[in-house]
Amino acid sequence: MHDLVKRFGEIVAVDHVTLSVPAGSIFGIVGPNGAGKTTTLSMITGLLRPDGGSITVHGADVWTDPVVAKRNMGVLPDRLRLFDRLTGSQLLYYAGTLRGLDAATVKKRSTDLASAFGLEDALDRLVADYSAGMTKKVALASAMIHSPRLLILDEPFESVDPVSAANVTEILQNYAAVGGTVVLSSHSMDLVQRICDYVAIVVSGSVLAAGTMEDVRGIGSLEERFVELAGGRKTAEGM
């Protein structure tokens, strides 16, 4: 993404943000509430049109070549409402067919993903009866059903128990290890520090630091670096 800008009236939600995400990496975007994380991810996925700047996904522009760009994406929005009167199997089937997969491919991908996420015994149950962790996992499986090259995940660990979080983390790491790319937002600094190769700290729509995890956090923790940057920015703005 290059020089992204998004305004809502007089409010600048995203202020000339430029980020490059290496293929095969897990890239974390962290920031306080209202920092512009979700707005940025919404523009990357084509759900929200930027007022300026451009976004390309594996060479395809999200707005001038949306079909090709979005074919490469799997998306998990924050607090996504699923069709919870479907079974897990039905949800994966419709996610796959909407992506243009044939029934045989959907069945195989569903079986593989259910095994990876530990959902084999839950596919015939209604999604409405799933726990929060299971719901998040079947939503992520739906985003991965078409084998995308890029995953965009907004708060993927929100309301997820530690066991499910560990399972999702392992799946994302395995996905990146075979060349997939993950861009995620999260409030959990410790988790982002543990699983992300790259990170950007965003405050008030601006990128205050971005790069490899080691370069951004320095000799301390990511949380310490975040507080140093975000706290300093807020103090300056309040003066």
Image (spheres, rainbow, N blue to C red):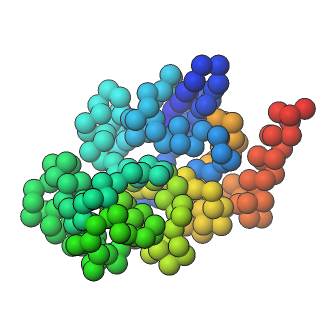
Query: Please, which residue is most extreme toward the top here?
Result: 9
Q: Position of residue 201 (x, y in %)?
A: 66, 48
Residue at 65% of width from left, 45% of height from top? Answer: 33
The residue lying toward the viewer, choosing from 175 and 117, is: 117
In which quadrant of the rendered image does the C terminus lie? top right
Residue at 37% of width from left, 69% of height from top? Answer: 130
The residue lying toward the viewer, choosing from 216 and 103, is: 103
Q: Is residue 219 visible?
A: no
Query: Please, which residue is most extreme toward the right here?
Result: 239
The residue lying toward the viewer, choosing from 132 and 153, is: 132
In the rendered image, which quarter is residue 204 located in? top right
Q: Position of residue 143 (x, y in %)?
A: 33, 56
Q: Is residue 182 visible?
A: yes
Q: In the figure, is residue 58 to the left or right of 202?
A: left
Residue at 48% of width from left, 42% of height from top? Answer: 41
Residue at 30% of width from left, 41% of height from top? Answer: 70
Q: Position of residue 61 (x, y in %)?
A: 35, 32
Q: Position of residue 192 (x, y in %)?
A: 60, 62
* 18 shown above or below 166: above
Disc tally is: 0
